[in-house]
Amino acid sequence: MDTLSLLRTDIEKLRKKSYAVMKKAVGEKVYYRGLLEFSNICRRDCNYCGIRKSNSNVKRFELSKEEIVNIASWCAGEGYGSLMLQSGERESRDFVSFVEDIVRTTKEKTVSEKLPRGLGISLSCGEQSKETYRTWFNAGAHRYLLRIETTNPELFNKIHPSSVSLQKRKACLVDLKEVGYQVGTGVMIGLPGQSEEDLAEDIEFFKEYDIDMIGMGPYIPHKDTPMRDNRSGSIELSLKMVAAVRIAMKNINIAAATALQAIDPIGREKALAFGANIIMPLVTPAEVRKHYQLYDGRPCINEQTADSKLSLSERIRSMGREIGFNEWGDSRHWRC
Ligand code: SAM
């Protein structure tokens, strides 16, 4: 079945099919990546994003190396296995060295009997030069998430300032692959003017670029952005996209995106039932979380306490899913 027909399939049929494909291709285990948003300083002015450069209502922050490494150690102690370090986009030499340093130190400090290679580190710090990607890879990061956002060129240009180019983003994904990363990308679902055909094309793009992992979720408006008057993407279409990607790409990793939780309190858990196998519990400190509001209504739940993590784990287990504690949970697609 082609990808467009998949998106048009009855949702219950799609759920059953995608779950079966997931079970066969990657198994039912769910892997955790602690999501640490370590800085909201950004040079970009993306029309959809709450931390865009020109949003002067945002208080800018950057966590210290010590804070980051402490949180990383906490994640390792809790058995998370992997950490996702995300930030706004910056290119300065200081920033490149800072990220290199936190990756290297996190690796060193999280080696233990349970994690002989330390935490698995994923980065999501935007468009960078190939040299920078290599520097961070050599420091110990081995996965990188850079969303293409949409592959429709007109739509891409509508939601970005002219300084951001689809061609450049594609070139970055190629650079990341060549450096050796497991490469993740994704799109926003339900962007204004986006069609089902566009989403089907996005899936074709993921296949063409041999993507190892997908992180995608609904578009949700933010009040301080030029796109404030639009509607959010729906949970139904978001779940259908997860399922269609699973069926089309089989053995990749698919994250149950944090944004799903903003449109449905158990949106992430629902995505697991549609073929997702990665969850990213938010470990950004509560004091700065309010300054990393990419969209309105971002859940500020505290997953960093043992209690709430337990309830997330319990909810996952109650779905009959095992959690891969202390495992990196690398993309099988990348290993093949
Ligand atoms: N600066 C890095 C980058 O651009 O890849 C990482 C941080 S960026 C804020 C992470 C992702 O947030 C973007 O790729 C985008 O898809 C998502 N995002 C931003 N604003 C959003 C919104 N209003 N609704 C849904 N997702 C949004």
Image: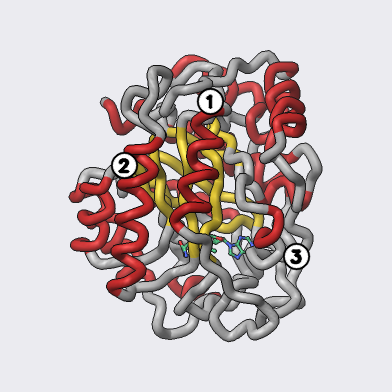
Q: Percent from the top left, x then y, of residue 319?
A: 71, 19
- Ligand 1 is found in which quarter of the picture? bottom right
The colour scheme is secondary structure
Residue drawn where x is 46% and y is 66% of the image: 152
> Earlier along the polypeptide chain: callout 2 or callout 3?
2
Return the mark for residue 79: 1
Does any atom of ligand 1 lie closer than 8 Å to the CB of label 3?
no
Residue 287 in view, yes or no: yes
Residue with the mark numbered 3: 296
- SS class, disc 2: loop
Mark identifier at residue 330: none
Dot 1: within a 10 Å radius of its alpha carbon, few (fewer than 14), some, or many (20 or more) residues? some
Q: Which residue is drawn at 45% across and 79% down?
A: 43
Which secondary structure, mark 1? Answer: loop
Q: Nearer the viewer, mark 2 or mark 1?
A: 1
- Residue 217 percent across, percent down from the top left: 61, 51
Q: Which mark is drawn over residue 142? A: 2
Point out residue 49 in the picture as x, y percentages from the top left corner: 60, 71
Task: Specify the amino acid type for callout 1.
Answer: Gly
Quarter of image, res 322 = top right
Crowdedness of circle 2 by 10 Å Cα count: few (<14), some, many (20+)? Answer: some
Is tag 3's residue or tag 1's residue first in the polypeptide sequence? 1
- Tell me the kind of residue under disc 3: Asp
Q: Does the residue labelled 1 lie within 8 Å of ligand 1?
A: no
Determine whether label 3 and label 1 are within 8 Å by CB: no
Identity, as a three-letter code, of the amino acid under mark 2: His
- Position of 150 relative to 19 (above/below): below
Question: Separation of disc 2 and disc 1 at Cα?
Answer: 19 Å
> Which residue is at a point 33% across and 73% down the rendered structure image?
91
Image quarter (top left, top right, bottom left or bottom right) of the C terminus: top left
